[in-house]
Amino acid sequence: MSFNMGKASKQRLCPAVGRKISAGECGECRGSRYTCPEDCGHNPFEPANYLQLLEIEDGLDAKTVGRMFEDAPDRPALEGMFRRAAEAKSPQALHVLTSWRLFNEQGADGMTCAQRWERAGFPGLKNDERVLFRAKMQMRVALLEIRCVIDEQHIEATDLFAPDRPTLSIVDRSLARQAVRFASFLTWAFPLPHFCRMAGSALVIPDWAPFEPLEIVTELVRHLGGPAGVEPMRRWLAEHFLRFGEALNATAWERRRLMFAAIDAKWGSAVYELRAPFSECRDVVDKTDRVEEDNLDEKERREGFAEARTWLDDAASPAVVVPEEAAPILGRVLLGQTFWRIEAMGAERLARLRGRLETVLGSRVRFTGERLDDVGARMANDEPRGDPALVPPRLLENAPRIEMVSSRLAMPAGGSREEIEAKVEEDQRRAFLDEAVPALDGRTPREAARDPVLRPKLVRLMKTHVRGHDENDLRSGRSTDINWLLRELGLDELDVPAPPLRPPPAAEDDEDRERWDEDEDEPDDGRTAPDPLPEEPFDFDEAAERLKAALDEFDTAQEALDELQLSGSTLMTDVSELTGDLLSEHEFSYLVVFLIHAWFALIQPGFRAPQLRLPVMRDALEREIDLLYKNGIPDRMDVLSAIVSDSRQPALLQLLLGHLFEGVKNAPKKIRPSIESQPAMIAVLKVVTNELDHALRERD
């Protein structure tokens, strides 16, 4: 091959051969005949030239698909498969099909499509495209664990399928914007001369302690009939990636269903008639240990209650870990002139609270009735269900359990929202060092760090802590230090730099916001618009009746979601857009159940969905979250009072929050939603309820 040297000005010094070469020679030889150093500015496979690499990859992908169709023995059949993959809901479907047909499936000649193309000399490809395609021929499934996020495009990761091999240097801007330390995911990767690239999308491997990510993948593959060895497993996953994803989702849903089914989440209330003067009964209760004054909200005042008390709990379960300075709550007592009502989360707590009240007041009160709503059972029934045949029984062992407990925690005075959150988090982590932890066989982290048998469990646990910490930082746009905790425990193997400061995921631009304001033709689906709401908001009884009807309407959450889709509702998409990265996948899934209840309490099935105003909802959500943090992070009673008071449907919102808030705020530490997520979930319910009320009254 000869090269046109061109004019001297067209030449460049090539560090690979130690002389000046023409641009044409550079373009035809770099990465193939010449071994280009990483810092050469003309090397498209140098990290600094990332955008140039993406352009090459886009052009190559189009040519690759064309070659795949040309090579197919039955092109119409392949085109049909390709079309179905493109229409599939799975984001991995197209990549699984193309990567398998190109790099893995062998024809009658014993060669793959890629190998036949290579043997033909890669007709139609330029040198850079040939170099990139040869790299992609080494693509294989990898189980990556993020070790370090270096900058806006560099990540270091370990392939857990080959943990003894060197750490991989990955260049991927999309991943670097959202990666957190010790997150694990299943994806495809291939090596370039100076770094690795990912291909396709990824399946996040959840934190299912005590199982390690590799254990989870291996057990799922084994259950699905796949091989045990690492290399055979990689090939099997390349062919069955979609089925593996279905099994992963089905197992996650079943674990969550079991978690909800085990909750004693019966929201209970009992009513007592006063048979002695109000002031006498109140004075007797106020002289009782573990009783403190509480605040009423406007709805409770309208119901006729004059005062409220909180009854603190001195028999909290030892399985529930609360801060030392927190006061566990047994329940509340609402004081009226002629009748009192007690409220508690959990049938067992309600029974104990009844016993306390009746013991203290004796014949001064007469029990008239109680009500229990089994929220846990409804949540379990509402969970989506996958194919049970896909779920390995072993991965259902140690399914998470939630025991709900209310507590009062004094918040630091003064300071910004961020400063208060940081102080609370640091205090909790310092206390954690010396707390007995069930996952560490009841030993403290300090003790486990010195025990060779328990140390691996501690490493696993602290990876989860660091991962959650980084996720919180990413959502809030912070970069805070947790490595002091690792150094305190002597976990040098985990002491890697925190991700750099990264902005939270960007909100929609103005063009995206405007498209939600555009009037759209109403669908001609035979459905009619729902009836307008009455002038006055629902009272407590009507709200409770409507909510009960919403709870009873569907057997599963999936049926409710199907009805939402048929109605033309954009609720879940809208809320997903609103919350962005404010909520994790688990937190959003938890919230979905209550969004469904709010919707069908206001809009009966069979009607056409009203159009929601996303920009208005976004602004309202920002205001609500700011208000929640105006005076520091509020406790439960303040939240319910403040957020319900100016709602368009206060009774309905109070019922919804009564179920939601207890579970979100008081879950055990291991699965407790982050501090940042709590006001978001509360505020979203209020914003959605207000917007639905507006849509059913106004015909804008």
Image (cartoon, grey):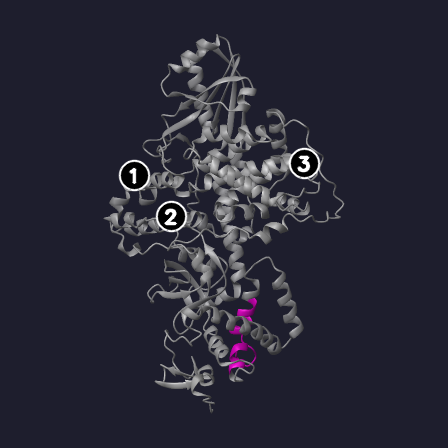
Q: Disc 1 marks which residue?
A: 431
Nearer the observer, disc 2 or disc 1? 2
Instruction: Give the residue type that dot 2 points to.
Output: His
Left or right: where 15 falls relative to 611 = left
* Residue at x 57%, y 40% (from the top left corner): 595
Q: Earlier in the sequence, mark 1 or mark 3?
A: 1
- 41 shown above or below 149: below
> Which percent across, then down, holds residue 562?
64, 46
Cα distance between the residues tagged 2 and 3: 41 Å
Marks 2 and 1 close (CB-CB < 8 Å): no
**Residue to which mark 3 is pinned:** 696
Q: Indicate which label's residue lies in the foreground, 2 or 3.
A: 3
Q: CA distance from mark 1 to mark 3?
A: 49 Å
Residue closer to the observer: 262 or 335: 335
- Rendered position, 305 above or below 566: above
| Dots 1, 3 in contact, CB < 8 A | no
Q: Which mark is residue 469?
A: 2
Could you tell me residue 185's position as x and y percent? 44, 58
Q: How many marks?
A: 3
**Residue 423 included in the magenta stretch of the image:** no
Q: Secondary structure at mark 2?
A: helix
Write down the region rendered in magenta. Answer: 97-118
Local crowd size for mark 2, using a 10 Å CA cut-off: few (<14), some (14–19), many (≥20): many
Amino acid type at mark 3 = Leu
Amino acid type, callout 1: Ala
Question: Is residue 261 in view?
Answer: no
Q: Nearer the viewer, residue 490 or 127?
A: 127
